[in-house]
Image: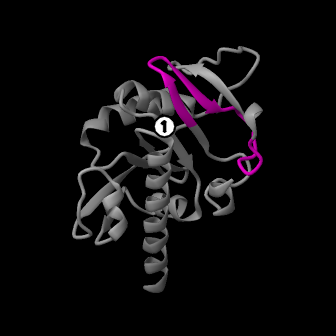
Amino acid sequence: QLFHQRGWVPATGGNFSARLSSDRMLITASGWHKGELDDSAFLVADLDGVPEDRSRKASYETLLHCQVYRYDESVGSVLHTHSVANTLLSRRYESIRLAGYELLKLLPGITTHDAAVEIPVFENDQDIQRLASRVNDHMKKLAAPAYLIAGHGLYAWGSTVAQARHRVEALEFMFECELRELENKR
C-alpha cells in the first residue's frame, strides 16, 4: 500500500517477492491491484517460477525475480516498481548516474554522500526468459542491487524485505530528484 500511495505501483503494475527457502519464494499473483493486496494476493512458487498451486498464475515477470534469487543466495526479497520517474528516465538513458546523494549510503559499500553509482537500463523484451538471461549476464557488473528496464520499471533487492524496501525508497527518491532537475533545465 505504501508503494501504491506514492505512485510507484499503479493499478496491477509491479510485483513483490520474498525468499522462503533455498528453492521457494512468496510472490504476488498476477492481476492484483497493488493498493489492495491481502494474503490471497500472494502465492508460493519455486525458483523456476512454477506456482505450488498450479491453478494460480504468478506474475508475468516472475522469472526476473527467480534470476536474482538464483544468482545470489543472500537475496531475501526482490521488489519491482513502475514510478513515473523511473519509467521516464529509463526511456531516455542507457543508465542513470546517481551522485552526491546522502541516500546513496543505503546501497552496499557506500559510506558517504560523496559517491556515484550507475543504475543500468536494459532494453525491454516481452520474452522474459531472454530478458532474465540478458540481466544475468551483467549481474557481476552491477554497482548496486538494482537495475531498470526501459519504459518498464525498477528491480531492487536486499537480504530482507525491509532492506529491499529501503533501497527502493532511496532509489525512487533519487530518480525523482533527477527527473525534476532534468525538467528544470528545460
Asked where in the image residue 6 lies, by quadrant, the reply is bottom right
Residue 1, can we see it? Answer: yes
Query: Is residue 39 in the magenta section?
Result: no
Q: Is residue 118 left or right of residue 87?
A: left
Q: Is residue 46 left or right of residue 177?
A: right
Residue at left offset 46%, top offset 58%: 90
Q: Is residue 92 left or right of residue 39?
A: left
- Residue 72 position, x and y percent, is 34, 29
Query: Is residue 28 in the magenta section?
Result: yes
Residue 186, can we see it? Answer: no
Residue at left offset 53%, top offset 63%: 88
Residue at left offset 49%, top offset 78%: 180
Which residue is disc 1 drawn over? 77
Asked where in the image residue 182 lies, by quadrant, the reply is bottom left
- Residue 127 position, x and y percent, is 54, 31
Asked where in the image residue 118 lies, by quadrant, the reply is bottom left
Residue interval drawn in magenta: 17-37
Above or below, comparing residue 35 to residue 93 in the picture: above
Is the residue marked by circle 1 packed among few (<14), some (14-19), or many (20+) residues within 10 Å?
many
Check disc 1 and give the amino acid type: Ser
Residue at left offset 58%, top offset 59%: 83
- Residue 60 position, x and y percent, is 63, 32
Q: In the image shown, does 21 or 79 lie closer to the viewer?
A: 21
Colour pattern: one colour
- Residue 133 position, x and y percent, is 40, 28
- The secondary element bearing badge 1 is classed as strand
